[in-house]
Image (cartoon, grey):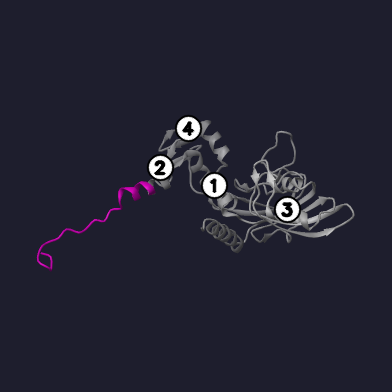
């Protein structure tokens, strides 16, 4: 008997169906994304592996990269080996000009992967720098981390040094700072300052919170000038200056935390009313 007189059954508290559905939806992913999230492939390479018949789910061959799976419950395998989350890696490269940001180039040009140690696991660049540009390029196999840094909603700051053609004045800087109209829409406000001039060029420092394709070059073109040389100095305060050109090193734990915090902080402020 219960101390209060009548025997009572223990209460079972189950989450409401809506919460259960939300949790289930959160853990389910398409097969290609699940493989990418595990840090084994890029998304495109994961799709190719699935379509090539290299991947099984719960012992069954699956060739549809858009098939839904639950990595927490389903047994995924590639080439007969169980898929387990790879150790998360975070690297920074001081990219020189003359390298394209891709794993392989159909035109045979040098790629940024030529500068990385050959014994590294699969890593993807976080954003890109065009062939002519230099500076900080980050790599990781942590897709969530990469998404947080590149998501336009997080407004993570990227700082560039641009040597531009002609004598640019404060009015030109104001135009860049307040936003210019590009083919894919107006740019967000930026921080812009003149670093120096010579008889034919002006050097600018620009800090932007977007990552559109060749954005700084297009912004400068929109005010009637041209970028002659472009260098990415920093991402969210993490600078490349201490690293020799062409060199690579692991990000320090404090740097990874700082980048995460910047994405979280900026993303939170951008959603505030």
The residue carrying pointer 4 sits among few (fewer than 14), some (14 to 19) or many (20 or more) residues within 10 Å by Cα, namely some
Taking the magenta stretch, the answer to whether it contains residue 97 is no
Q: Nearer the viewer, mark 1 or mark 3?
A: 3
- Give the labeled residue for mark 4: 64
Say left or right for 166 vs 214: right
Question: Magenta stretch mostly in which secondary structure?
Answer: loop
Taking the magenta stretch, the answer to whether it contains residue 4 is yes
Residue 262 shows in this picture: yes
Q: Which mark is residue 74?
A: 2
Q: Nearer the viewer, mark 4 or mark 3?
A: 3
Q: Earlier in the sequence, mark 1 or mark 3?
A: 1
Which residue appears at 40% of the width and 38% of the height? Answer: 58
For the residues labelled 2 and 1, the Cα–Cα distance comes to 17 Å
Residue interval drawn in magenta: 1-22
Q: Quadrant of residue 11?
A: bottom left
Q: Earlier in the sequence, mark 4 or mark 3?
A: 4
Q: Which mark is residue 39?
A: 1
- Give the labeled residue for mark 3: 175
Contact between labelled residues 4 and 1, with CB atoms less than 8 Å apart = no
Helix, strand or loop status at disc 1: loop
Q: Which residue is outermost to the front?
A: 171
Q: Earlier in the sequence, mark 2 or mark 1?
A: 1
Which residue appears at 61% of the width and 55% of the height? Answer: 156
Q: Which residue is outermost to the right?
A: 199
Q: Position of residue 89 (x, y in %)?
A: 59, 53
Judge by depth and name the residue closer to the eye, 260 or 225: 225
For the residues labelled 1 and 4, the Cα–Cα distance comes to 19 Å
């Amino acid at each position: 008997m219960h101390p209060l007189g009548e025997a009572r059954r223990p209460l079972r508290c189950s989450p409401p169906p809506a919460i259960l559905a939300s949790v289930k939806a959160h853990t389910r992913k398409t097969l290609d994304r699940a493989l990418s999230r595990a840090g084994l492939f890029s998304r495109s390479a994961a799709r190719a592996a699935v379509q090539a018949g290299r991947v099984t789910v719960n012992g069954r061959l699956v060739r549809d990269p858009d098939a839904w799976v639950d990595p927490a419950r389903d047994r995924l395998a590639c080439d007969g080996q169980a898929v387990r989350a790879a150790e998360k890696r975070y690297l920074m490269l001081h990219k020189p000009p003359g390298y394209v940001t891709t794993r392989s180039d159909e035109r045979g040009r040098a790629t940024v992967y030529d500068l990385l140690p050959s014994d590294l696991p699969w890593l993807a660049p976080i954003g890109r720098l065009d062939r002519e540009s230099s500076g900080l390029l980050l790599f990781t196999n942590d897709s969530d981390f990469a998404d947080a840094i590149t998501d336009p909603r997080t407004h993570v700051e990227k700082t560039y040094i641009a040597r531009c053609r002609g004598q640019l004045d404060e009015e030109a800087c104001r135009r860049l700072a307040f936003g210019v109209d590009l083919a894919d829409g107006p740019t967000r406000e930026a921080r812009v300052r003149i670093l120096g001039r010579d008889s034919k060029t002006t050097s600018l420092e620009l800090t932007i919170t977007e990552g559109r394709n060749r954005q700084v070059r297009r912004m400068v073109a929109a005010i009637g000038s041209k970028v002659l040389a472009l260098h990415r100095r920093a991402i969210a305060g993490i600078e490349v200056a201490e690293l020799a050109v062409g060199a690579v090193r692991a990000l320090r734990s404090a740097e990874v935390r700082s980048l995460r915090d910047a994405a979280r902080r900026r993303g939170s402020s951008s959603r505030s009313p």
